[in-house]
Amino acid sequence: DQQVKQNSPSLSVQEGRISILNCDYTNSMFDYFLWYKKYPAEGPTFLISISSIKDKNEDGRFTVFLNKSAKHLSLHIVPSQPGDSAVYFCAASALSSSGDKLTFGTGTRLAVRP
Amino acid sequence: NAGVTQTPKFQVLKTGQSMTLQCAQDMNHNSMYWYRQDPGMGLRLIYYSASEGTTDKGEVPNGYNVSRLNKREFSLRLESAAPSQTSVYFCASSPTVSSYEQYFGPGTRLTVT
């Protein structure tokens, strides 16, 4: 049972335009959400996060939106740059007695065309 | 400051062979994790160590063992490798088990034939 879903395996965007990556989740206990970026042959690196008490978090060109009622979050990249081409993973966390563990989505491969 | 390092980068095993994947971090983090990444599956947690001296199972622990050797090092052992364990393995660390942000190593690509 995939609790965190990224239904678009790939996305292609023109340089300078907006990239929107989507993520849906099913577990209502998730209270913190993160986006990771992964280049080939490297490990994922943390990009941006949002707590469930917020609906928006912005960091430079990257903005994450959270819609708790729809159990949906999205990552907006504006403007998109060729260096943004990577695989983006959505992750979610639910506080438990054994600490927080991340549940990852399957990833969306973003290609930014020059 | 190297962050999280993993050895080896690549490995090919025959079915039934054993091996240990090594992971070390130099950020003085308390918590460490092992994930596997398979096509179409995202990253799945194998084992984690909330602090030195403790280890716990994650989502897919079968066929693996771990050792938290000290605060810096967390190893993953495959006792009898199977083709289903062909994957890319990532080690990660975080300041504590309640720190959401995890720092990942570069990965080990393992093929079991």
Image: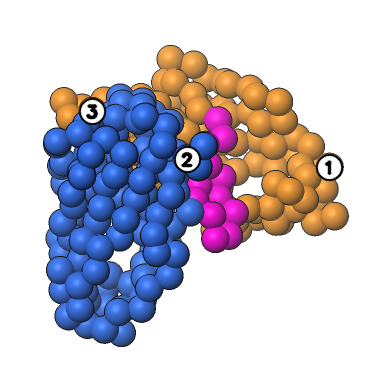
Q: Colour of chain A?
A: orange
In the depicted structure, whether residue B2 falls above or below residue B82: above
Residue at mark 1 to residue at mark 3: CA–CA distance: 40 Å
Q: Which of pointers 1 and 3 indicates the residue nearer the eye?
A: 3
Q: What span is colored magenta in the figure?
A: A35-48
Rendered location of residue B55, percent (x, y): 16, 41
- Left or right: residue B52 versus residue A107 is left
Q: Chain of mark 2?
A: B
Q: Which residue is mark 2?
A: B3
Q: Which mark is residue A16?
A: 1
Residue at mark 1 to residue at mark 2: CA–CA distance: 32 Å
Q: Chain of mark 3?
A: A
- Left or right: residue B70 versus residue A6 is left
Q: Quadrant of residue B71?
A: top left
**Secondary structure beneath disc 2?**
loop
Residue drawn at x 81%, y 51% is A14
At label 3, the amino acid type is Gly
Residue A47 covered by magenta stretch: yes
Q: Which of pointers 3 and 2 indicates the residue nearer the eye?
A: 2
Residue at mark 3 to residue at mark 2: CA–CA distance: 22 Å
Q: Colour of chain B?
A: blue
